[in-house]
Amino acid sequence: MAKTQTLKAETRKRTGSGVLKQMRREGYLPSVVYGKGTENLNIKINAKALSDMLAHSASESILVDLEIDGAGPQAAFLQATQHNPLSGALMHADFLAVTEGMKITAHIPLVLHGEPIGVKAGGIIEQLVRDLEISCSPKDLPERIDADIENLGVGDSLTIGDLQFPEGVEPFLAADVLVAIVNESRATKSAGASGPAAAEAASE
């Protein structure tokens, strides 16, 4: 399951683009916390602290304990981020306050493990899905989904239905959607075509 990290935050009452630019220059990231039945709360967090968290996370779908103005931790899910299109730097973050019984939608990576026997025989593995959209409760949020593909031969494939999801985690993609397939390489096809032809020619 995904680990929850602590992130300190301060409320902010100032608005306006000029104020937000100054805030970013000071190393803060303008953010907002919202949730069902609660008013939106404008906060600012240490931009480097969040960037470091994301750099060590498999995806941006992370859980944090927000300590706002030194108060007790508020569990929150990083719902969305905005990045500078040129530098890639964080510009804004939206946090969803976690409440009892809620479900979240997250995007997590799909990681394939092992070398398929079909690749050892000359085939080529093609991964068609690298990012999965899932639904789960915050406590069940996985960092990623892993899949062993060592037993895939040439022509074999892996589908969403073949994946092992933790209890409480549901994918949005249908069970028959292809995740990966081992295709024949051009060399393998050429060898397969020339083999019978050569044998036939030799027998004449």
Image: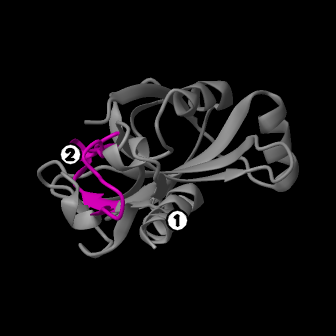
Q: Is residue 33 left or right of residue 91?
A: left
| Image quadrant where one finds the N terminus | top left
Residue 194 tag number = 1
* Residue 163 pos. (x, y %): 23, 55
Alpha carbon separation for disc pair 2 and 1: 53 Å
Up-down relation of residue 6 to residue 133 (above or below): above
Residue 142, x across and y down, in percent: 29, 42
Visible residue check, residue 69: no
Tell me the crowding category of disc 1: few under 14, some 14 to 19, or many 20 or more residues within 10 angstroms, Cα based. Answer: few
Q: Nearer the viewer, residue 36 or 137?
A: 137
Judge depth for marks 2 and 1 and give the one in front. Answer: 1
Helix, strand or loop at mark 2: helix
* Amino acid at dot 2: Asp
Q: Inspect the image, locate mark 1, and give the three-letter code of the amino acid beneath it.
A: Ser
Residue 54 vs 164, above or below: the answer is: above
Kind of element beneath mark 1: helix
**Residue 118 in the image: x percent, y percent?**
36, 50
The residues colored magenta run: 134-158
At x 81%, y 54%, the residue is 85
Image quadrant in which you'd find residue 38? bottom left
* Residue contact between numbered discs 2 and 1, judged by CB atoms under 8 Å: no
Q: Which residue is mark 2?
A: 140
Decide whether residue 156 is among the magenta residues: yes
Residue 43 visible, this orientation: yes
